[in-house]
Image (cartoon, helix red, strand yellow):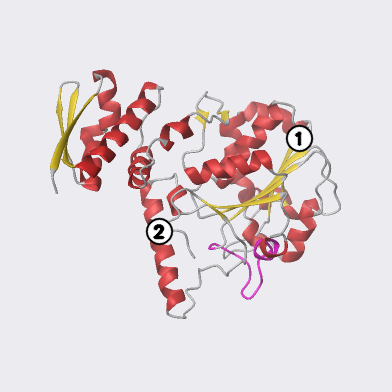
């Protein structure tokens, strides 16, 4: 295989951002794509097999574009750019950067960071009800919250309702001190955290006091009709079939619903069927309902989380092939999911 060279220009003011601390990002690109990268001032020389050189050039080019737009390059950006270059689709990185969903209280833009997240956001925009299924760290809840807050600010809906089942993992509510609200608050804390970050504590408290933003356990939804609202059901894998049916039949006119869950992390009692699993089977033929399945490729937390999720996926696949139960794998839902961009690591 012939060795080729390619030269790109890297302005000095962006080289530190693109290269990373102690050139960590460049070293990762070199190791992953099997190329040699040499910097001479603003001139960057890439040496290696032609295909690898082209991929490394596209990765550096996309990271440079992100840097020029004012982004702080992260390890997740680099990892995903490398993964996309393997599919000859590194340009998707800058395309994702153009889709700003909302801004946090500090002005930081909230964007989809992977192809799967982009598909998830697009489905939410198009469909009245969307199921977002995927492992921890894929941004299911956070992106849904950002979409809800932006719709609320744009007066597209009159209120935001956030709910999740108060299911404990190894502890009972009775063991926790305080009144009922004190007991359920720990289960709703992740929703509060996202609200504070995107909306700000003062704005949240002001709208909460007026009844325009509500964070409540799923049990509080029974008997209500939720009109003109943006409703998010989080941790839906912990609902029972009856709870899920109750929730989905609360939806009124002018409302939008996002249901998020991770079928590999159920806290229901043994032999209890998940309402999320049942809903995916029952509602599979309804066009107005979108289902997006995110994978380990869409994890945007620390890179180690992505490796952990991938390791569990591989373990579950091996257990399934050997006919054993791992105790953490999800059952087949019978639903054709919209796959995220890579698709390579999806469970079949």
Coordinates of residue 263 in the picture (x, y in percent)? 57, 62
From the top left corner, tell me how far across and down residue 171 is, in percent: 59, 63
Assign the magenta stretch its main secondary structure: loop
The residue drawn where x is 31% and y is 36% is: 59
Which dot marks residue 159?
1
Picture coordinates of residue 133, whole percent (x, y): 58, 54
Residue 28, by quadrant, is: top left
Where does residue 188 sit, x and y in percent of width and height?
64, 47
145 with respect to 319 (left or right) = right
Question: Is residue 153 visible in this depiction of the protein?
Answer: yes
| Residue receiving disc 2 | 310
Q: Is residue 195 left or right of residue 250?
A: left
Point out which mark residue 5 bears.
none
Q: Which residues are magenta?
A: 264-279
From the viewer's side, name the closer residue of 80 and 47. Answer: 47
Q: Dot 2 surroundings within 10 Å: few (below 14), some, or many (20 or more)? A: some
- Residue sitting at 69 percent across and 44 percent down? 127
Q: Magenta includes 267?
A: yes
């Amino acid at each position: 295989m012939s060795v080729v060279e390619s030269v790109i220009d890297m302005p000095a003011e962006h080289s530190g951002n693109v290269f990373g601390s102690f050139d960590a990002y460049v070293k990762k690109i070199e190791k992953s794509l099997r190329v040699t990268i040499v910097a001479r001032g603003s001139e960057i020389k890439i040496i290696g097999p032609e295909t690898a050189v082209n991929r490394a050039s596209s990765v550096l080019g996309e990271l440079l574009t992100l840097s020029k737009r004012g982004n702080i390059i992260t390890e997740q950006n680099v990892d995903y750019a490398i993964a996309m270059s393997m599919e000859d689709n590194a340009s998707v990185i800058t395309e994702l950067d153009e889709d700003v969903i909302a801004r946090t209280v500090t002005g930081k833009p909230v964007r989809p960071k992977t192809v799967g997240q982009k598909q998830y956001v697009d489905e939410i925009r198009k469909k009245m009800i969307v199921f977002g299924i995927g492992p921890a760290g894929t941004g299911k809840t956070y992106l849904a919250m950002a979409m809800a807050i932006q719709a609320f600010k744009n007066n597209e809906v009159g209120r935001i309702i956030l709910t999740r089942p108060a299911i404990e993992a190894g502890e009972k509510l009775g063991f926790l001190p305080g009144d009922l609200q004190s007991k359920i608050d720990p289960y709703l804390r992740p929703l509060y955290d996202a609200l504070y970050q995107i909306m700000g504590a003062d704005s949240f408290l002001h709208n909460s006091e007026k009844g325009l933003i509500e964070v409540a356990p799923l049990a509080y939804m029974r008997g209500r009709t939720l009109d003109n609202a943006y409703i998010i059901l989080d941790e839906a894998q912990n609902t029972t079939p009856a709870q899920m049916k109750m929730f989905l039949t609360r939806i009124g006119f002018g409302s939008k619903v996002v249901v998020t869950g991770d079928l590999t992390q159920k806290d229901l009692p043994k032999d209890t069927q998940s309402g999320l699993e049942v809903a995916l089977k029952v509602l599979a033929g309804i066009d107005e309902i979108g289902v997006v399945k995110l994978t380990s490729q869409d994890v945007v937390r620390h890179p180690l989380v992505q490796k952990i999720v991938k390791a569990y996926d591989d373990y579950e696949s091996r257990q399934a092939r050997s006919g054993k139960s791992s105790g953490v794998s999800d059952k087949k839902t019978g639903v054709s999911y919209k796959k995220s961009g890579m698709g390579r690591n999806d469970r079949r």
